[in-house]
Amino acid sequence: MMIAALLVTSAILRVGTQTGHVLALEKLTSGAAEAADAGQESAQSDAPMAMSPDIEAMLAAFKAREARLDQREAQIRDRMNALAIADEEIDKKLAQLEAAENALKQTLALADSAAENDLSRLTAVYENMKPKDSAALFEQMDPDFAAGFLGRMQPGAAAALMASLTPERAYTISVVLAGRNSSVPKK
């Protein structure tokens, strides 16, 4: 937005400087016509008219202003080119980040899938073991860990396993199972 405003300002100033230049030349031309009408010698009319110091100063100021505007326009063009290059670099980096994010999502999905497959397989192994054999393992497990497997098992296999555990261990695992979802929001 600022660049557009600067470009519009530049155009207005250029038109303004050209108008001043044209007016100065018109004044000089009209002055020459008046001098010719007054009957001055033809040698004087062929010689270039001398400009008044005010007009010379004005023309010099306009030329200096135009040079400054040209320089400013060049700076703005250079800045716009630099911004365009920076935008391209940002777009490339963003595309690389998006690709890395997608690759990471795929890796995480694969890891989650593999972990779920491992848990399902181990749960099936515990379900297919004799309850007395699996009970010996579950007696050694942390109650939270054991409750996780029991929660995934078929109810019949889980019941046979719980019946094979010591009453204290079965109670501890039951408390963990009962309280697992108690902290889930109800609304």
Image (cartoon, helix red, strand yellow):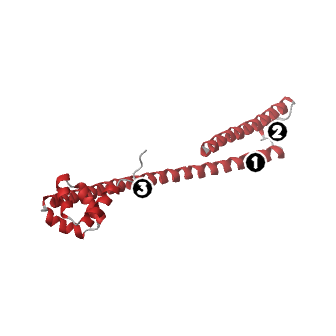
Looking at the image, is mark 2 or mark 1 earlier in the sequence? 2
Percent coordinates x, y for residue 121 in the rendering: 18, 58
Taking depth in this image into account, of 28 and 103 the one nearest to the observer is: 103
Q: Is residue 99 above or below residue 33?
A: below
Mark 2, secondary structure of its residue: helix
Residue 83 % position (x, y): 52, 52
16 lies above or below 114? above
> Relative to residue 84, is residue 12 drawn left or right?
right
Residue 161 relative to residue 22: left or right? left
Q: Nearer the viewer, residue 109 or 48?
A: 109
Disc 2 marks a residue whose amino acid type is Gln
Measured Cα–Cα span from mark 3 to mark 2: 72 Å
Residue appearing at x 13%, y 59% in the figure: 128
Question: Helix or strand or loop: what does disc 3 sit on?
Answer: helix
Q: Which mark is residue 93?
A: 3
Percent coordinates x, y for residue 47 in the rendering: 78, 41
Q: Which residue is mark 1?
A: 61
Q: Where is mark 2, residue-wise?
A: 44
Residue drawn at point x = 79 percent, y = 35 percent: 27
In which image quadrant can residue 42 be found?
A: top right
